[in-house]
Every structure is written in structure tokens, then in C-alpha cells.
Image (tube, rainbow, N blue to C red):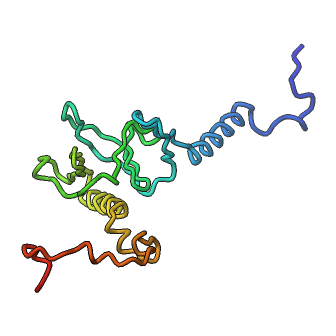
């Protein structure tokens, strides 16, 4: 004698349970992927934690390693004045370039012997990277350049309404610290 788990046809599901579970899994997976959070970057020297979610700019670049000088594809995230790099697009970053210490970003096809390459320079280090296309290279040079400029003192000096220099607040005249020593070309007598 065989009995079904559903006593009447009115209570039988329209879809088999396996189909319903599969549908719920796909729905949960889609929701999770759309809200996936990337782990933060922890600076190994200072133990400071940097949130890298919602970056200003992101994408794949290939970076020359510092020690072996081989080329490795990395996912880069620009957030404020920090440029983070990861092994995959949702992995925790394993490195950071602080653009506040950078002096230039410029094309470097000849230097790297790679197409669509550019360099980001600090007083101590030059990072060589290349993009997949010339447009991506130009976009990266543009956003990194803007981030470097935003960190510079010249940028803030040209924005008097937002940030005022402490000397301007004192209303003191400090012209007397400059004197004409005869050899200074900036003084016209």
C-alpha cells in the first residue's frame, strides 16, 4: 500500500521542492552578489583599516612587481587619495599606493616596453602599470592625476574660500622677512 506525502491534490505543490529550492538559491545568490562587500585593507605597518567599498574608480590593470619585476594582473580601486590593488575584484586588497606622496603620473610605453603603460612616481618608488586599452590608460592617468592634485598644497592654496591659511587669519604683515640681498633675482630695484 503506497501513500503520498500530500493527502489531497489541493495541497500538492505546483513545483517540485527541488525546483523551489533551486529558485531560492539563485535569488539569494543574485541578492548577495549585488550587495557583496569587499574586505577592508589593513596597512601592515600602521595596522590602520581602510574601507575600500564604493571606490571612486576601479578596474583591471597589470602591475610590475617590485621585487621580481614580473608583470601581474591586479584589480585596482581608487578611493580618495589611496590606490589599492587586489588579486581579484572582490578580494581584500594586499597593497596600497598613497597618492598623497606621489609626484607624477605619466605615460611610460618606452620605459616599460609595454603598450598602454603609465607610471606613478613617488620620491622613493616608481610603479609601472599598463591597461588593456589606450582609453583605459588615459582614464587611469586622468583620475590618478586628479587625486594627486587634490592632495597637493597648491590645490588647497588656490581654494581660499574653503581653506584659509593660518597666516591670513593672523592679519600680520610678514613682508619684513624678505630682504633684498642684491643677488636675489626676485627683487627689482
- Judge whether 92 appears above or below 105 on screen: above
Quick one: 38 or 172, which is closer to the camera? 172
Quick one: 166 or 22, which is closer to the camera? 166
Q: Residue furthest bottom?
A: 189
Identify the residue at image location x=89%, y=35%: 11
- Judge whether 43 appears above or below 137 on screen: above
Identify the residue at image location x=33%, y=62%: 152
Q: Quadrant of residue 22?
A: top right
Identify the residue at image location x=60%, y=44%: 30
Image spot of residue 145 (x, y percent): 30, 61
Q: Quadrant of residue 3?
A: top right
Q: Residue furthest right?
A: 7
Quick one: 106 or 17, which is closer to the camera? 106
Identify the residue at image location x=40%, y=49%: 77
Which part of the image, by quadrant, shows the C terminus? Answer: bottom left
Quick one: 128 or 33, which is closer to the camera? 128
Which part of the image, by quadrant, shows the N terminus? Answer: top right
Q: How many badges with numbers are in the image?
A: 0
Q: Is residue 179 left or right of residue 47?
A: left
Image spot of residue 132 (x, y percent): 26, 51
Q: Residue furthest top?
A: 1
Image spot of residue 40 (x, y percent): 50, 40
- Judge whether 8 appears above or below 58 on screen: above
Image spot of residue 142 (x, y percent): 30, 63
Amino acid at each position: 500500500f503506497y501513500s503520498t506525502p500530500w493527502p489531497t491534490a489541493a495541497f500538492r505543490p505546483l513545483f517540485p521542492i527541488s525546483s523551489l529550492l533551486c529558485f531560492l538559491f539563485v535569488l539569494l545568490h543574485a541578492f548577495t552578489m549585488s550587495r557583496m562587500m569587499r574586505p577592508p585593507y589593513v596597512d601592515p605597518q600602521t595596522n590602520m583599516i581602510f574601507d575600500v567599498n564604493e571606490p571612486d574608480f576601479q578596474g583591471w590593470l597589470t602591475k610590475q612587481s617590485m621585487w621580481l619585476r614580473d608583470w601581474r594582473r591586479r584589480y585596482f580601486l581608487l578611493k580618495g587619495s589611496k590606490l589599492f590593488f587586489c588579486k581579484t575584484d572582490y578580494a581584500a586588497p594586499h597593497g596600497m599606493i598613497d597618492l598623497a606622496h606621489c609626484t607624477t603620473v605619466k605615460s611610460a610605453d618606452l620605459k616599460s616596453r609595454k603598450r598602454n603603460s603609465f607610471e606613478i612616481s613617488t620620491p622613493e618608488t616608481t610603479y609601472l602599470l599598463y591597461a588593456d586599452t589606450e582609453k583605459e590608460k588615459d582614464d587611469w592617468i586622468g583620475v590618478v592625476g586628479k587625486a594627486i592634485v587634490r592632495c597637493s598644497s597648491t590645490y588647497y592654496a588656490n581654494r581660499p574660500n574653503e581653506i584659509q591659511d593660518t597666516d591670513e587669519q593672523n592679519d600680520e604683515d610678514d613682508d619684513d622677512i624678505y630682504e633684498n640681498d642684491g643677488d636675489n633675482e626676485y627683487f627689482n630695484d
